[in-house]
Structures are given as structure tokens and as C-alpha cells.
Amino acid sequence: YLIDAKQAEDIQAMLRPNIVAIVQGLLATLQESRNEELTAVIETVINVFEEIEGVAVELTHHLVASFVLIVRPDEEDGDEETADLETDGGYKALTAMGILECIKQIAANYEDKPEILAGMEGECVPLMVLVLEKSITDFYEEVFDLVESFIGTIVSPNMWSLFEVLCHCVVRDAMDYFPDMCPCLHLYLTTDKEGFAAVPDRLKLIVQVLQKVLADSGDEISPSTACRLLEVVIVQHPGAFDGEAIKLIVETALTRLQETEDKKSASLRAATQQVILSLMYCQTEALLLVF
């Protein structure tokens, strides 16, 4: 039923002294029942009560545990297979999605609290790895959002490990999700330039991913996005490419350029040309040696 603002304030005042215990009870009930409606209640509590800040990491821990129980219910028995989320009318998928939304909301509420985000990150990395490595595509976008939350100002060693998982995910089966993933990859390149450059394999991996998207994607959005990201890599890391990488990039770009003759592909054609121009400007000597 509907309540007015004064009634809402009175109810919140009554709940506030015990809100942490209430949340813990909600979490215990969620783990037992896996009821999708509870996630909406928990998300509301997260948004309304600032007292949650002190238990934000603990709350995240329990939410992650509930998610894993839904996605991989037999993990304790050594079974690494993921569950069929479409059983029971899709309620499992809805509950798991609600849990991810709760975690995202906590991260958004405390984006200016690096100590909380760092603790949340440690809890969430196994969840993100599980979704990506097991190709649970229903939750890719939510995982990409979480990655963005955790690498906005710093990239930890754990998140650099996840970078490799993300890249392998694209190469393996996530080509269709590349535009949604691209902001994550861009943040990796721009948030921690030194960290990216410190491990040469990271450059090789991102080039491999972008070259594959540029060569194999059947739509226009993904290769255009790949070109823009490739341009960022070239400009930010001049001199980092060897002759083999430059040759591969140019040949792939020229091949794609030849396939974009119709006017509908004007944006892709411009993006492809920009990649070649960036190489000419930033890698002039290496480009001349190759060609």
C-alpha cells in the first residue's frame, strides 16, 4: 500500500538502529530461498540507509556467495558445471541478475570510498572470472559495469589478471559483446598506462583482440569501435609495436577498408583510415621498414 513521506521517515527511523541485523537476515533468507523479490528489497535498503557503509564489503561477500550458489549450485561437490538458469520459469536468472544489480549499486554508492571499492573488488573478482570463463552471457554487461567501477582510478594486480580473462573472452566467444566491453578495455589503457606498458604481453593481447574484431566482425559498430581503441593504443604507446604487429594491423585495416565501399560504411571507413594515419604518424620508421 502507499505511504506518505512522513510515514516513510517514521518507518526508516524505527528500522535504522537495527538495519545491519535486518540486512543480515535478508541475506540469509536470500541464500535459502533464492527469491528474486528479496534482491529488490536489499537494493532499496542499500540506497536508503547510510549505515550500510560499515558492512558494505561483508554485504558484497554474501551477495557473491548467493550468486555462486545459484549459478554453480554443486560447487561444494566438486562439480564445476553451471546451472540451467532458465529452469523454474527463469527465476534463477532473475534472482542472479538482481544480486548483480545490488552489487553494482553498492559500488556506485561508494565510488568515492577507495577502501570500500578495494574490499568489494577482492570479493567480486571470483564472480567476474566465473561469468567470463564459463561464458554466462546473460550477465556479461553487468560484469563489464563492475569492471568499470573497480578500475576508474587504479588497476590492481587482480584486475590486471581479469584483463587477460576479458581479452580471451572476446577471442573465444564474446565478439557480439565487444561494444559493451570496449569502455572497460579503454579504462585499462588510460587509467594505468604504466601498468599496461610494464607487461609486453598485454599489448600483444589487446592487439590480437582488436585485430580479430576488425577482421571477423560482421557488423559495422564492433570494427569501428575496435579501430578507435586501436588508435588509442598506437598513440599512447608509440614505438611499442614490432614490425610483425604493424604489418598485421595495416593489412587487416586495408582489407577492411576495401570492404567498405558503400556509403553506409562511411564511419567504419573513416575509423580504419585513422588507424593507418596514426601508424604513419607514431610509427613512421617501423612502418617504412615493413613496407
Image (cartoon, rainbow, N blue to C red):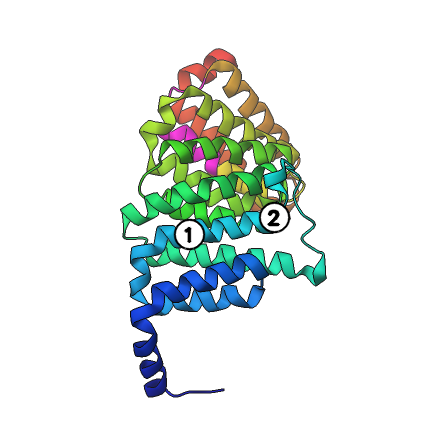
- Indicate whether 142 appears above or below 195: below
Percent across and percent down for residue 156 are 35, 35
Q: Is residue 234 magenta?
A: yes
Label 1 element class: helix
Give amino acid for label 1: Thr
Query: Disc 2 marks which amino acid?
Result: Val
Q: Earlier in the sequence, mark 2 or mark 1?
A: 1
10 Å crowding of disc 1: few (<14), some (14-19), many (20+)? many
Residue at coordinates 49% horizontally, 86% vertically from top-left?
1
Q: Is residue 223 left or right of residue 155?
A: right
Magenta segment range? Answer: 229-241
Q: Secondary structure at mark 2?
A: helix
Residue beneath disc 2: 71
Q: Main secondary structure of the magenta part?
A: helix
Which image quadrant for residue 189? top left
One can see residue 36 in this view? yes
How far apart marks 2 and 1 lie (CA) works out to: 16 Å
Does 66 appear above or below 48?
above
The residue at the point 49 percent across, 14 percent down is 243
| Residue that carries the numbered disc 1 in the rendered image | 60
Q: Position of residue 72 (x, y in %)?
A: 61, 45
Q: Position of residue 111 (x, y in %)?
A: 32, 53
Queried whether the magenta region covers residue 98, the answer comes back as no
Residue at 55% of width from left, 47% of height from top?
68
Foreground: 269 or 204? 204
Q: Give the camera-side residue of 249 and 186.
A: 186
